[in-house]
Image (spheres, rainbow, N blue to C red):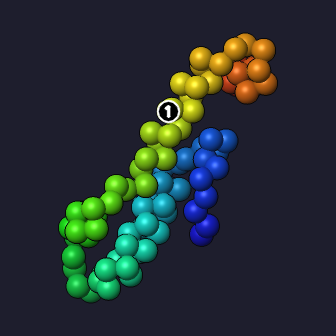
Amino acid sequence: MILTYSHEACVITERVLSQVQAAEMGFLRRFRGVTLSNKVPSCKILKALSVEPLLRIARSKLRWFGHLTRMSQERSASQDLLATSK
């Protein structure tokens, strides 16, 4: 799986969200040298590394939506939004 940041145009389903979370925790576990057999909870790993989960993607999507709603009606991205909401 490849993680990208061009998420404005894609729909994030629960399955994709779960895959992103699993990939993220896999990276962080390897970074900390912890395996699943060590039974260390994810929240402890996140806290120890002082990182924020990738769920910021959802926040970023909402920020992009707000940007689109404030955009002038003549812009193509705004027109696309209006076309999909009808």
User: Residue at the location (64% across, 49% down)?
Assistant: 6
Q: Residue at x 32, y 85 (%)?
A: 33
Q: Is residue 7 left or right of residue 40?
A: right
Whether residue 85 is visible here, answered yes or no, is: no
Residue at x-position 37% and y-position 56%: 53
From the image, which quarter does the C terminus lie in? Answer: top right
Occupied quadrant, residue 32: bottom left
Looking at the image, residue 21 lies above or below residue 35: above
Residue in view at x 43 percent, y 55 percent: 54
Horizontal and vertical percent position of residue 7: 61, 47
Asked whether, in this view, residue 15 is left or right of residue 79, the answer is: left
Q: Residue under label 1, please give it.
A: 62
Task: Pick out the residue farthest to the top.
Answer: 73
Residue 41 sits above or below residue 34 on the image: above
Label 1, residues with CA under 10 Å away: few <14, some 14-19, many ≥20: few
Residue 64 image offset from top left, x and y in percent: 57, 33
Residue at the front extreme, as displayed: 50
Q: Is residue 56 left or right of residue 69?
A: left
Q: Nearer the viewer, residue 77 or 40?
A: 77
